Image: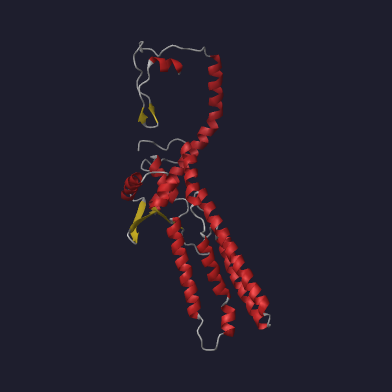
Amino acid sequence: MDEAAGDPAALELLRVQRGRLADRLRLPWWYQAGAALVWAVVFAGPFTSRYLPRGMPTWPVFAAAAALACLLQWCLTRVTGIRLPFRNLRSPSPGRPVGIAILVIFLAVGETERLLIGGGLIAAAVAAAAVGVAAELACLQIALRVNRRELRGGGPA
Amino acid sequence: VTARPDPLIHPIARLSICALLASGADWVEFAALRDAAGISDSVLSKQSRVLEEAGYLQVRKGAVGRRPRTWFRLTAAGRRAVADHLAWLVQLEASVSARTPVEVEDRVVGEDRAEPSCQLPAGVAAGESLPGVVEGGKRQKPLRKVDAVMM
């Protein structure tokens, strides 16, 4: 333990170590499949509220989706060994634009579906939901890449 | 150099632990930290205890089934100390890299001018051993006369 870090080469070593830590942050296939399922349930909301019989509550479906999302996040933390800090959209961070994009896609696709279902264009509404799921998964990948870059760079830029 | 080094996180293992925890993660698990830092379980346990006692590190112990899981995070004081120490290292690197080309040039010119020498250092008689050389923190086997001439 006498080896000291006064050597500037220590910085290079730290970069390598951060790279190793960042490389652990990868999405397993089950996480992506689970996330796709969660978003599919979310974007199925406009259909269920319109086509389910009156008086039948839709909240259990959304509660189950939220529980699945929490479970996925918990499993991912256990698998990677890294727990990232929670940041809301008000706090400036490199992942903020992606967070805003996720929210905008959610709102835009939900509204589009409602309009299409109202106009009787069910197939188009289903297509919009599918595009929404794909877009949200792409955002998830981008968010993860941003987090990896942040870990590699040594913190928020 | 205006930033100051922190003697507590100056050793490379402790610096690695702190720098990895300060890199943007909130909590990092024992195995992930050990693998990323490239240190052994015992070194991580020992050094994390030192950092925890200094108030730089927060440790949370739990278990998943029968397997114990330990998680680490930096405290606010730890984050400040790491930021200061890394700033000092960056300044040190900048000052060294700014000085290095001139020094290297001087050394090359000096070596070109010097006569090749096979003389032993003063005070070393034939057959005597040279004092041990400390390299990488470990004392190496003492050099003999023949080795010294070859260097």
Measured from the top left, where is residue B8 in percent x and y? 36, 43
For the rendered model, the colour scheme is secondary structure
Camera-side residue of B41 and A91 = B41
Q: Is residue A103 visible?
A: yes
Does A90 sit above or below residue A10? below
Camera-side residue of B35 and A19 = B35
Q: Quadrant of residue B126?
A: top left
Does A41 sit above or below residue B81? below
Tag count in the figure?
A: 0
What residue is at 63 percent from the left and 79 percent from the top?
A: A114
Q: Is residue B82 visible?
A: no
Measured from the top left, where is residue A105 in percent x and y? 61, 69
Q: Quadrant of residue A81?
A: bottom left
User: Which residue ends up furthest to the bottom in the rendered image?
Assistant: A54
Quadrant containing the C terminus of chain B is top left
Measured from the top left, where is residue A111 in percent x and y? 63, 76
What residue is at 56 percent from the left and 62 percent from the top?
A: A140
Measured from the top left, where is residue B60 in percent x and y? 34, 57
Answer with left or right where residue B109 lies relative to residue B139. Answer: right
